Amino acid sequence: MSDHSTQAGLPLKPLYRPEDLEGFDYDQKLADPGTYPFTRGRRVEVGRKSWIHRELSGEGDPKRSNEQFKYLLEKGQTGIDVIGDMPTVSLLDPDHPMARHGVGTTGVSICRLQDYVDLFSGLPLDSISISQSLPAAFAMAGTYLAARELGVEAKSLRGSIIQTPLYCDDSGYFIGMPVKLRLRLSRDSIEFATHEMPKFHAFLEDSYYISEGGIDGVEEMALAFVEIRHITRDLMARGLDIDAFAPRIAILLNCHMDFFETVAKIRATRRLFARMMKDEFGAQDPRSLACNIASHTSGLSMTAQQPVNNIARGTAQTLALAMAGVQAIEISTFDEAFRTPSPEAHLVGLRTQQVVALETNVAQVADPLGGSYFVEALTDDMEARIWQMVEEIEAAGDAAELAEQGYFRELFIKAMERRAAQVDDGTLMQVGVNCHQIAEEEDRLLKEVAERKIDPDYTRIEAIIAFREQRDMDRVRTTLAEVRGQAEDFDHNIMPEIIAATAAAATMGEIAGVLRQAYGGDYDPYNMATSPLE
């Protein structure tokens, strides 16, 4: 990276001219929005409601998080985005000894069916989109059952659940779950949703969370495509028609501070996805070619120093995403470096989206940057570099085997080290961090709000302990035994057994534990909990 390159190292010229697009074919490279290769967008989506406005939410227990959702919907949010706390995304129940001090501090604590009922109670589930950064198979089971209990047809549910089987173990997700099991759960949950929740994007590729470790835009999307391709091949080998699930594939990607690189990355991603689905996987349905893209603005770009600057960062990133034509936006709030969003930060983030949507007119034209010499040249460069890296990774071996061998972990470590060095030497400029600094005693604007402490929810731990004592343990054991037994048949879709166990009051940690056992692992990766089946 230099003064004359993007954050991902793509070289920049001081001026772009017609010759930079020599031989450029409009129909081949661009075409109109809503037509192949979808560079300019899935459809002509213009107007003040052209994307879903949502803010990342979840804190404490499900009832507390439910109140957050209702507050944001009242303020004009048009969808919800749920984040689990670290124990939840690590598949640990809140009463696990390793979970105690993290319960509810970085998201919502979720482990049982009643939690999902409490989480979604009183929400218009049949008319809003529900995005979830929760362990996919377990969240899908809980959502499916909770919707039924709340009187909503599962077939009407809209939203998404992340699928991250190849890389999650390298970032604290799915602790102790082997790659083959993670891929199995992704495959089975997507297949289940294809039949039972047809409006739901169960195949949400989450490149955001891996990007937050420091990888650049090219690496982010190359890894996303490697995972999408691996899961797609698995589903097709299962006998699922590409057009049965491809329309429900979505990507949650990161929005860095490099404005035009972000725009080019999104446009290149749409084009690559369309060509891949058409030429390689044989998709016929136009909806299978038009990738649904959502974005969360970069938490890594949010600084603890001068947090007020983060409002400006969120605004710039929102503007880039609006001009790139994504389907949903979430803004990392000004207190990102300190905590889950405070009510004040939530409102500022939502209002930022609303100001951009309602006051700037940038959403009144589809792909307003289309045809720019600079943007089109950068899009072409991004496309070529992303695909080159995809080919390099796939040439190195099977993606699942590479994950088991630590191939991707090494890539993430190098990226983190590279970014840290760039911040340290000033190559990557951050106002307030390595330039335009102010004395610590002067840096108090919004600090009082940002530094407000979130304590672990110890009452939640007590509630789960009491819950375990009140259950019908014979029913819990029977359903858990079914999960473990059926999981040994790789060709069997395990979702009905996970749903049955969830309905029987088994916890997420218990279900995950018996799945580990079925794949030859320990019930508890920390050897601190005992299986109900023992």
Image: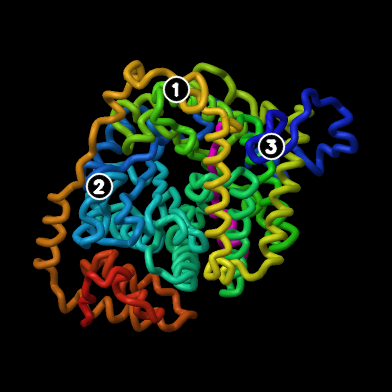
Looking at the image, which residue is at 85% across and 37% down? 24
- SS class of the residue under badge 2? loop
> Disc 2 or 1, which lies upstream in sequence?
2
Give the x, y percent position of residue 62.
23, 48
Q: Is residue 320 shown above or below 295?
A: above
Give the label on residue 104, or none: 2
Q: Name the residue under label 3.
A: 40
Q: Residue 309 carries which label?
A: 1
Q: What residue type is labelled 2?
A: Gly
The Cα–Cα distance between marks 1 and 3, rounded to whole angstroms, is 31 Å
**Mark 3 and mark 2 in contact (Cβ < 8 Å)?**
no
Report the amino acid beneath label 3: Arg
- How many dots with numbers? 3
Position in image of residue 503 (x %, y %) = 25, 66
Give the magenta-colored segment's residue range: 242-257
Q: Quadrant of the N terminus?
A: top right
Labels 2 & 1 near each other (Cβ < 8 A): no
